[in-house]
Image (cartoon, rainbow, N blue to C red):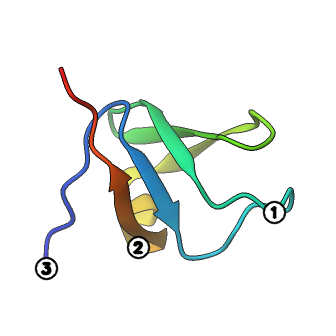
Amino acid sequence: MDKEFGLHDVVQMKKPHPCGENRWKIIRMGMDIRIKCLGCEHSVLIPRREFTKKMKKVLEKHEE
């Protein structure tokens, strides 16, 4: 199963952030994906392969 996600989508990860929030916004895509916690605004850079393993589902698709 291929998970489909795009820039500015809001995703849920398998593990919540230490601040307690589990909603992340994709703010950069490439070989690595940068996501920003919607609770505390902390951002994390994750390799794409690791991101697809750790992502649970897309909560909100970005409308263009």
Drawn side of residue 6 relative to residue 47, left or right: left
Could you say where residue 40 lies in the image, as x and y percent from the top left?
81, 39
Q: Amino acid at mark 2?
A: Lys
Q: Amino acid at mark 1?
A: Gly
Identify the residue at horizontal 53%, vertical 66% (top origin). 13
Q: Quadrant of the C terminus?
A: top left
Q: Is residue 19 above or below residue 31?
A: below
Determine which residue is flagged by label 3: 1
- Disc 3 packing (10 Å; few <14; some 14–19; many ≥20): few
Front residue of 9 and 1: 9
- Nearer the observer: mark 2 or 1; the answer is 1
Tell me whether the residue at label 3 lies in contact with that at label 1, contact meaning CB atoms closer than 8 angstroms. no
SS assignment at label 2: helix
Q: Amino acid at mark 3?
A: Met
Q: Is residue 18 above or below residue 40?
A: below
Q: Is residue 5 above or below residue 7?
A: below
First along the sequence among labels 2 and 1:
1
First along the sequence among labels 3 and 1:
3
Could you say where residue 8 lies in the image, as x and y percent from the top left?
38, 31
- Nearer the observer: mark 3 or 1; the answer is 1
SS assignment at label 3: loop
| Measured Cα–Cα span from mark 3 to mark 2 | 11 Å
Determine which residue is flagged by label 1: 20
Could you say where residue 48 lies in the image, as x and y percent from the top left?
37, 52
| Measured Cα–Cα span from mark 3 to mark 1 | 28 Å
Determine which residue is flagged by label 2: 53
Residue 59, located in which quarter of the rendered image? Answer: bottom left
SS assignment at label 1: loop
